[in-house]
Amino acid sequence: MGEFSVWHWLIVIAVFVVLFGSAKLPQAARSLGRSMRIFKSETKGLMTDGDDSAEVTMSVQQMREEAARLRQEAAGLEQQAPRPQELKTPDAARQGD
């Protein structure tokens, strides 16, 4: 009683053909397949979401280390750079000639 027989399936298919037309059915099947693929990839992404958080934490730590290294490098460059008062402007260079 609760199962569909072959005749039930034929009636369901006939109703779909009448409602959507035979040209729209392949397009509807492709859309359904794409939707199922997207749904599957999203659910897989949700399941592996906990694993990605360790990678994100690691990459944040790496970014912090890189920022600290760049700060040290910038401090070293500041010490080597000439002071603004030591720089000659083009007007001052012409006056000195």
Image (cartoon, rainbow, N blue to C red):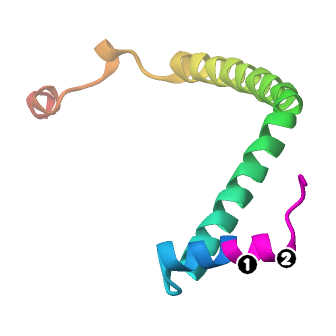
Query: Which mark is on residue 86?
Result: none
Horizontal side of residue 67 vs 58, given as left or right: left
Q: Is residue 2 above or below residue 18?
A: above
Horizontal side of residue 83 vs 10, given as left or right: left
- Residue at horizontal 42 percent and vertical 21 percent from the top: 82
**Amino acid, disc 2:** Val
Is 10 in front, or is 57? Answer: 10
Q: CA distance from mark 2 to mark 1?
A: 6 Å
Mark 2 = which residue? 6
Is 45 in front, or is 54? Answer: 45
The question of residue 7 being in magenta is answered with yes
The question of residue 5 being in magenta is answered with yes
Where residue 32 appears, x then y in whole percent?
64, 64
Quadrant of residue 5 within the rendered picture: bottom right
Where residue 12 appears, x then y in whole percent?
67, 70
Tags 2 and 1 in contact by the CB under 8 Å rule? yes
**Which segment did they paint magenta?**
1-11
- Residue at horizontal 73 percent and vertical 60 percent from the top: 37
